[in-house]
Amino acid sequence: MVEVLTRTGPLDGRSFAASGVRLSPAEPAARLSLRAGGDAVKALSKALALSLPLRPKSTSASGNLAALWLGPDEWLLIDEDGNDLMAACAAITAVHSAVDISHRNVAIDVTGPNVEDVLAAGCPQDLSLRAFPVGAASRTIFGKAEVVLWRRSEQHFRVECWRSFADYVFGLLEAAARDPG
Amino acid sequence: MLLIRCPYCEETLPEAEFTYAGEAHIIRPERPSDQTDEQWEEYLFIRTNVKGAHYERWRHMHGCGRFFNAVRDTVSDRFLTTYKAGAPRPDLSTLTESQK
């Protein structure tokens, strides 16, 4: 009997490049959905060794761990090193909710000079640098799927979506990237 | 597409991220069992259905997730203001004044 477990992702083997944009599934990462009131922010920031952002649309990062502001009491934590974020929060006694969603989300890296146009095909937000600067993140919609957009550089967005929406999101990005108009 | 200002995100964002959630400032009776049928019916079903400035709840469903309140003109579909849940009703006269 074979005893080897292999991790399969919904976008394994997919990638797409067109003029001005490249789509590639991001490496698996540890993710945490963190909800906490103002009284727990300090303790959680200390435990995670990064200060949770408190301004709308903002992010903070420490090494490969990043915290994305999603709402007044909600953050998405992404650790590209795959560290156990649940363990980091476990000792905090202040009231908070931490849920490991590492396997619920997948991410797609969208890069290239046309990245804004391609995302604008499905996202109604203003994605210009002025309204969506580098380092900004926002939960929004892409077509019919809810996504979290995180602008990591001028020409690089990370699109986080739910695993079951990944095929749809990737397909729609691909269609948008293929359409030169 | 309408643009709606979310008082929690402090940004004006497209309507597609929001969902409508009925009339605002409707308070659930503390003791429903003390209500007469008419009072309970009033609470559950009777709404103002105004032509003009309407106090209503919205939710930033695909954004910060928060419920908030808005005043929208039901004739022109224009949002006069939005404000955080729990905040008192804004004074209508000052709102309409600022639109002139």
Image: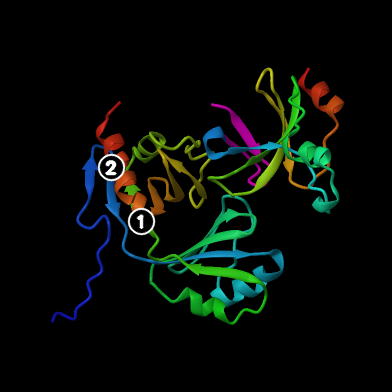
Image quadrant in which you'd find residue B23: top right
Label 1, residues with CA under 10 Å away: few <14, some 14-19, many ≥20: some
**In-front residue for pair B86/B31:** B31
Residue at image location 67% in from the left, 70% down from the top: A40
Residue B17 at x, y percent in the picture: 54, 39
Locate residue B9 relative to residue A81 in the image: left or right.
right
User: Which residue lies under the disc numbered 2?
Assistant: A171
Residue A24 at x, y percent in the picture: 27, 52
Label 2, residues with CA under 10 Å away: few <14, some 14-19, many ≥20: few
Identify whether A161 is placed above or below B45. Answer: below
Which is more foreground, mark 1 or mark 2?
1
User: Which residue lies under the disc numbered 1?
Assistant: A163
Quarter occupied by the N terminus of chain A: bottom left
Please name the amino acid that badge 1 sits on.
Answer: Arg
Locate residue A181 relative to residue A40 in the image: left or right.
left
Residue B97 at x, y percent in the picture: 83, 22
The disc numbered 1 marks a residue on which chain? A
Dot 2 falls on a residue whose secondary structure is: helix
Which region is colored magenta? Answer: B1-13
Residue B41 at x, y percent in the picture: 77, 38
**In-front residue for pair A157/A167:** A167
Locate residue A30 relative to residue B49 in the image: left or right.
left
Q: Verify whether residue B11 appears in magenta.
A: yes
